[in-house]
Amino acid sequence: MKKIINGRNVAVAIMLFIGSATMAQTTTNNLKTTQTTEMKTYLIEREIPGAGKLTPEQLKSISQTSCSVLKEMGPRIEWIQSYVTGNKIYCIYKAENEELIREHAKKGGFPANVIVEVPSVISPATAKK
C-alpha cells in the first residue's frame, strides 16, 4: 500500500510541475486591473515541400516573419522552437487558444496544417522522478 501512495504522490508532483510550466500569465491593462490567462502548449505541423532543403537565409527570413507577427499579436502567443524535417516543420508554441495559432499562421503567410494541444510533456527525466 505504501508504494501506491508514493506513486500517487509522484503523479501529483508531476502534474503540479507540468501545471506550473504552463501556468497562467498575468497581464495588466490601462485601468491597472489584472487579468489572468492560461497559456497552453501546442504542436503545429506545417507542410512545406522541401523544408529540409531551405537555406540558413531562408530559415532566418521565415523566423523574422514569425517574430514580427508575434510582436504585433502581443503576449498571448509565444513561439518556443521548431524542428525542420524533409517536407515539414514542427513548431512548439504557447498560446491562450488554437485560434491565436491560426491567426499567426494566416498573418505570417505559412501553413498550420495540424494543430494539437499538448496536455503533458515527458522526457527521460520523468523516469527518474
Image (cartoon, rainbow, N blue to C red):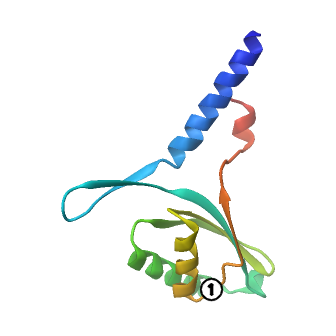
Q: Dot 1 corresponds to which residue?
A: 110
Q: In the orientation shown, which residue stands out farthest toward the left?
A: 31
For mark 1, does the 10 Å Cα neighbourhood hold few (<14), some (14 to 19), or many (20 or more) residues?
some
Relative placement, left or right, of 114 versus 104 is right
Q: How many marks?
A: 1
Q: Residue at x 72, y 44 (%)?
A: 123
Asked if 46 appears above or below 39 in the picture, the reply is: below
- Within the image, what quadrant is residue 40 found in? bottom right
Asked if 39 appears above or below 45 in the picture, the reply is: above
Asked if 77 appears above or below 37 in the picture, the reply is: below
Quarter the C terminus occupies: top right
Tag 1 secondary structure: loop
Q: Residue at x 67, y 48 (%)?
A: 121
Q: Return the residue nearer the eye: 67 or 5.
A: 5
- Within the image, what quadrant is residue 17 found in? top right
Residue type, numbered disc 1 = Phe
Q: In the orientation shown, which residue stands out farthest toward the top?
A: 1
Q: Return the residue nearer the eye: 16 or 124.
A: 16
Can residue 126 be seen here? yes
Quarter the N terminus occupies: top right
Q: Residue at x 60, y 30 (%)?
A: 13
Can residue 63 be seen here? no
Relative placement, left or right, of 65 versus 117 is left
Q: In the orientation shown, which residue stands out farthest toward the right?
A: 86
Asked if 3 appears above or below 126 in the picture, the reply is: above
Q: Position of residue 25 (x, y in %)?
A: 40, 53
